[in-house]
Image (cartoon, helix red, strand yellow):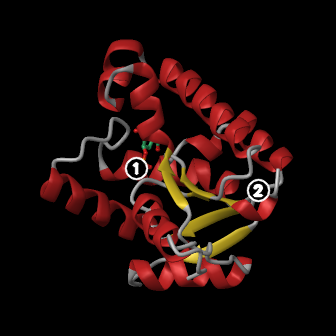
Amino acid sequence: MNACNAVFLVGFMGAGKSSVGRALGQRLRWDFEDLDDRIVRREGRLIPGIFRESGEAAFRKAERAALRQVVEELRSGAAKVVALGGGAFAQKENAELLEAAGVPIVFLEASAEELWRRCQEQAAQSGMERPLLQDRNQFRRLYASRLGAYLRASVHIATGGRPVDEIAAEIATTLGLKELAIRTEQGEVE
Ligand code: S3P
């Protein structure tokens, strides 16, 4: 696999993995994928439904299988930005899989307070349901228990109070990622 043809975004709930990932994909003209969307497609159920009906262990199993599939597909060389769910990189086996694949792993950092605020805002604005989002204290504890895992990422990017495009630009510059050239119908490269 060409390690420079993929980027994985990790971090806690509310870190901005999906919005930054989408912006980075657009900037580079790379595909963007949210791993949670693949889990939903593979399982034929929404994430809250998987947690409710089958429990967290079943969700983690589905998450691991989906991640293995993504990594396998990257061997074709297609350029892709992948946003992982908040717990994915905290699972040792998943971290080992990505590290062995040699792909850049970017940790989107923010304080627990800021992450909590963003998650509350998203829930109020779009009704986004997060099964592991309960009360503020549980949120802080879960964040603290995962921080060590996130810090294993190869690159750490601060996100507090920054626009999504600026964060995406910093990732591209830090990793030296190149925009894909688009060939027009006339064969010109844009
Ligand atoms: C989870 C975070 C969610 C989703 C699932 C579990 C977690 O993704 O994968 O609800 O364990 O933190 P987001 O980080 O995109 O909310």
N-term-proximal mark, 1 vs 2:
2
Q: Amino acid at mark 1?
A: Phe
State whether residue 6 is above or below residue 50: below
- The residue where tag 1 is placed is 139
Front one among 25 and 53: 25
Seen in the picture, residue 22 relative to 181 is either above or below; the reply is above
Picture coordinates of residue 22, whole percent (x, y): 44, 64
Mark 2 near ligand 1 (CB under 8 Å)? Answer: no
Q: In this picture, is 113 found above or below 69?
A: below
Q: Which residue is mark 2?
A: 103
Which of the labelled discs sits on residue 148, or is there none? Answer: none
Q: Is residue 105 left or right of residue 162?
A: right
Which x, y percent locates residue 127? 16, 47
Q: Nearer the viewer, mark 1 or mark 2?
A: 2
Task: From the viewer's side, name the closer residue of 79 and 95.
Answer: 79
Left or right for 158, reference 74: left
- What residue is at 38 percent from the left and 38 percent from the top? 132
Question: Splitting the image into 4 quarters, where does residue 138 fall?
Answer: top left
Q: Quadrant of residue 4?
A: bottom right
Q: Which residue sits furthest top?
A: 54
* Residue 71 on image: x %, y %: 70, 41
